[in-house]
Image (tube, coloured by chain):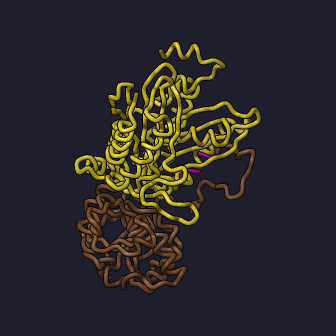
Chain colours: A brown, B yellow
Amino acid sequence: MTGVNDLRMRQWQLRTPLSEEDIGRLQIGDIVFLDGCLFTGREGFYHRLFDLGEAPPVDLPTISNVTFHCSPAVNETSPGVYHIPAVSATASFRFDKYLPLLFEQHGVRAVIGKGGMQPEVYQEVFRKYKAVYLTTVGYGLGAMYGRGIQKVKEVYWKDELGLAQAVWVLEVEKFGPFLVECDPSGQSLFALANEEINQTFEGLYTELPQPKLKRLGEVTSPGKEVL
Amino acid sequence: MISRETIHATAFELNRLAAIQIPGDARQAVGRMYKRETNKISKYVLGQILENYRIAVDEQRPMCADTGLPRFYVKVGNEAAVEGGMVALEGAIRQATAEATAAIPIRPNRVHPISRHDYNNNVGVHAPTVDYSFEPNVGWLELTAVHKGGLFGGDYRMLFPADGIPGLKRFFLDCISEFFRRGMSCQPLVVGIGIGGTKDTCVRLAKEAGCLRIVGDRNPEPEIAALEEELLQLGNSTGFGVMGLPGDGAIMDVHIEIAYAHTGGMPVAIQHFCFAHRRMSARIEGDGSVHYREDPGWFTPFYRRDSVGFEELEEQEA
């Protein structure tokens, strides 16, 4: 069986929108850099689109099939002109329920973010749409990712959602690196890592008693991931 | 007399330096981990973290775009005279935070917790957080800016004396299990642990232990220092590296602070301070001169005092 250290870590530089062929070649542990265009979105974007049923501020497939769970650090250099020196991802598992709709209705095929999602989401949703999850590296590499942003092409819903939650359309060049966390076959890098680590980690608990006071929601089995 | 404008300018500069330039102790700790790491993806990630530190300084970019919840720790010399008093001091810090948010920029993270309204300046109700402590016989002010994320990497648990150190170890490992997977805590990191006091005191001390002591520093109580070393070793033998990937460890250091607790309880809080280890300090002398430095110097003997009177400590420090 393949372990994390056996992964090939091949490097790819891909142009958006990502083609089916490009995505099809990706495997977990590969490193990806992007050229082209993508749009950001987080709580506010998903809430308006899928909870409130509003139309997107722009026809999303005309922009890109890549979305990024993040907020930028941004300054307005002159009215309506924005500069983004740094950008970092936010944890993606909070948005997993919206992804089937994002893939189905808006053509998204690559999600960039932090921390990935549960293996079941990959098996049920990503595999079906032949989509990939690309995790940012680190995660706080704001300066490095900021360097890949060439231009803010547009910002939507800024007044409605604020700077951190707005939908930013970014023109990027050699934007990365990202690690392939879920490949189109639905495999997960983090699930593989968890399996390996649990073999050592659970052993550390053998001598340690349970706490005197138990609580609802507590982790009772250290090998079980709670998301 | 320390002028309001000096405090304002210093607070602005501290926000700028904190956001861009990671202190040497943390940078070097990550460098040592990079050299030691034997797992290839973990090593690759550590290399990128070091590269990002460099780019941030070279190109004067915020090193992480999630600039966390900017906050200040202020140590006030008992003899310090501040123009406009403490109200003016806090006003200067709030103004500097709002200005720095737009100028650096720092992401405007602070929103109303229910309506989610954002003033886009990191200022609001109890924002920025400002904590104060005092120091006898001196006329300076010390300011430390900390930008720490706030979503993952910490917890609180009421343990009991019968849980003891094994209970603490279990809680310490549970936090690793909860937050190291997928790298949610943005490791490598410093673990701050607060033991004792009331619930709020131990959470505060854990935060201060994690954010306000430099890598390699040890608690002056030998038993606590030994526990810091023991937990550091335990935490780095879990199999976790960076990003929840297999690795040779992801903890730069463990810092423990204590407060006297209820006789029946042993409350514990744990805080993970990530590799985006943003802190910067400055002392403003009574004559208005400003000296920037990386060690906050927050935990003075006076701050950790256990005596009824302060006279002996005051003399020592004078």
Q: Is residue B13 above or below residue B110?
A: above
Question: Can the viewer see residue B274?
Answer: no
Q: Residue at x 70, y 41 (%)?
A: B159
Is A110 contained in the magenta span?
no
Residue A69: name its quadrant: bottom left
Is A202 contained in the magenta span?
yes
Q: Position of residue B271 (x, y in %)?
A: 54, 45
Q: Residue at x 71, y 45 (%)?
A: A211
> From the image, which quarter does the N terminus of chain B lie in?
top left
Side (left or right) of B63 relative to B265: left
Residue A63: name its quadrant: bottom left
Q: Is residue B233 above or below residue B305?
A: below
Please tell me whether the stretch drawn in magenta is mainly helix, strand or loop: helix
Which residue is at the far front?
Answer: B84
- Foreground of the two, A190 or B146: B146
- Foreground of the two, A160 or B195: A160
Which residue range is magenta in the image? A197-205
Q: Residue at x 50, y 60 (%)?
A: B111
